[in-house]
Amino acid sequence: MFTLVRHVTTLCALGAALAACGTAGAPHTTGRGPAGSAASAPSSSQPPTLTPGPGGLTPVFMNGPRTRGKTVALTFDADMTADQGKRAAAGEHFDNPDLIATLRDLKVPATVFMTGRWAEQYPAQARSIGSDPLFEVANHSYSHYAFTADCYGLPTVSADRMRADVEQAYASLRKAGVPHPMPYFRFPGGCYDQQSLRALSGLGVTAVQWDVVSGDAFATDADAVVKQVLDGVQPGSVVVMHCTRSAAPTTERVVRTIVPELRKRGFRFVKVSTLISQTGSHR
């Protein structure tokens, strides 16, 4: 789920055959989450979102400003497809509690993009992460099916089901006990196009991509992942990583290395919402 963005379509740079993947407008602050769904963010929190594009097109966020201080957002995709329940029942681990414990130990704010299916499989963990002020939980679809064709082998969601898939994910997050899922959405595989952006118009979500590919998916060499992150981070960067032991076994070790090094370089860790709030002017 690692992307190179070219015009509207974003492509994964590392085989999104894994079920562990995961143009911006000016931001405004809104108290609305996805319209008319169980996903609505509480009006008291008013999380920052980007202004929709022409015709209400879903806006896309990639990174914060480069000139507002040395901030960086670590994001973690908690992936699980709709049909992986049997693998989980057989002992495959799509969670990574040691990673979450490390983030807490190091006091690193982070944004976790959860699929609805992951929240259903690990409701206690979803509730714990979603209730911890150190973290914010956002939407990574229900099924982790792609929103475009030819997205590295992922099954696809039909255009008429895209909106329902996002709403179902929010419902699953809330049912698991996540009190305030953020109005942010990460496309499975990082793949999107005009049709998928139109399909989510009116939900009140900002699509969140990234500008630093960690390379942690299926990685066995933690040092290589560390180098890729440290070489890529700039002020305002969004780093994509994963919260799935089976698909990203080195991530916890990587975090233990990059956090002190980035702090030594003067970087401050923030959530995606903080970066969005720093982008442009508010209304």
Image (cartoon, rainbow, N blue to C red):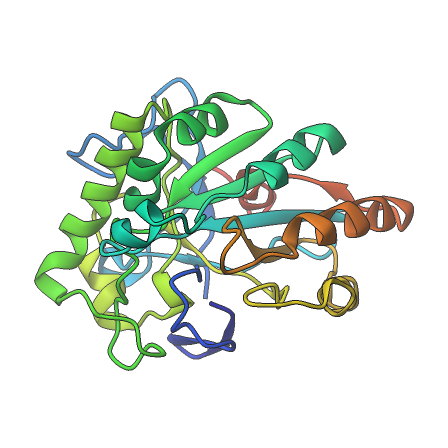
Vertical arrangement, residue 89 with respect to residue 233, above or below? above
Q: Nearer the viewer, residue 91 or 141?
A: 91
Vertical arrangement, residue 3 with respect to residue 132, above or below? below
Q: Residue at 26% across / 37% down in the picture?
A: 170
Q: Nearer the viewer, residue 28 or 231?
A: 231
Give x and y (percent) for residue 175.
25, 26
155 to the left or right of 224: left
Vertical arrangement, residue 259 with respect to residue 178, above or below? below
Q: Residue at 49% across / 42% down in the picture?
A: 112
Give x and y (percent) for residue 215.
62, 68
For this orientation, the residue located farthest to the front is 90
Give x and y (percent) for residue 81.
29, 56
Q: Is residue 205 visible?
A: no
136 to the left or right of 228: left
Give x and y (percent) for residue 30.
37, 33
- In which quadrant of the rendered view does residue 270 lie? top right
Q: Residue at 26% across / 71% down in the picture?
A: 194
Q: Residue at 44% across / 36% down in the picture?
A: 137
Quadrant location of the C terminus? top left
